[in-house]
Amino acid sequence: MKTFEEHLEYAFRDKKLLENALTHSSYANEVRGGVSSNERLEFLGDSVLSLIVSSYIYENFKKMPEGELTRLRSSLVCEKTLCSFSRKLNMGEYLLLGKGERKNGGAERDSILADAFEAVLAAVYLDGGMEPARKLVMRFVLAELDGYDVKADFKDYKTLLQEIIQRNPEESVTYVLTDQKGPDHDKLFTVEVRLNSNTIGVGTGKSKKDAEEMAAKQALSLMGEPV
């Protein structure tokens, strides 16, 4: 465990928390005797991870709309990304797996590694608080974002579409809200972008603005413009 703590760059005060975080359900079921799996820690770690990543990108990608922020966050907390974090920590080597699970390659299975990262993150959070948890997450997230060009990845699709349409002064673009569904706190809007009276793109989003951006993006794509 000490070697793994060195990989984490964090020393646990409560070593049982770390052991619990590394205990897969296959091992807990096999050993029994009061041994708990890391599933509850995984549940907590998922929320801690989301808060840390959401806070960072909210503060550092100030011009990015909600829909794009959601997509960026999803790319940073998805299974593929999390299991890559675990592999950098050599986590598979330290996981407590049942004999059958280990024999069948569980130590290298993406889903197990991703879940284990969330469980270990929760253990760090419970043992030391938010700061060491944030330090662990950002150590990997910053590497993922290295070279990420906000200006290149975020495009104002409505402005781009408007610039193209303005080349023909007789043409005009309008955005029409065609549908909205869901409760007030979680609505989904659908917008059509129309060139004169013809629909040239449809978009959905959690705000009218995001839906308009997505409609403009679809219109640009259908026009053969790079998006």
Image (spheres, rainbow, N blue to C red):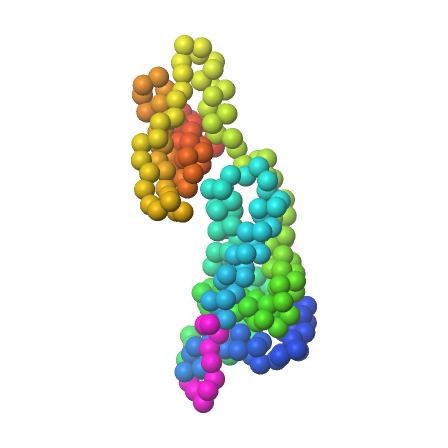
Residue at the image point whose x is 53% and y is 74% from the top: 21
- The quadrant where residue 64 appears: top right
Q: Is residue 4 magenta?
A: no
The magenta span reads 30-40
Q: Is residue 33 left or right of residue 57?
A: left
User: Magenta region, mostly helix, strand or loop?
Assistant: loop
Q: Going by the picture, which residue comes out furthest to the top?
A: 170
Q: Return the x and y of residue 132 as percentages of the image width and height.
A: 65, 65
The residue at the point 47 percent across, 80 percent down is 36
The answer to whether residue 84 shows anywhere in this view is no
At 38% from the left and 35% from the top, the residue drawn is 203
Quadrant location, the N terminus = bottom right
Q: Residue furthest bottom?
A: 33
Give the percent coordinates (x, y) of residue 35.
Answer: 47, 84
Query: Can the viewer see residue 17 in this picture?
Result: yes
- The answer to whether 50 is drawn above or below residue 67 in the figure is below
Q: For this view, does 227 lie left or right of residue 93? A: left
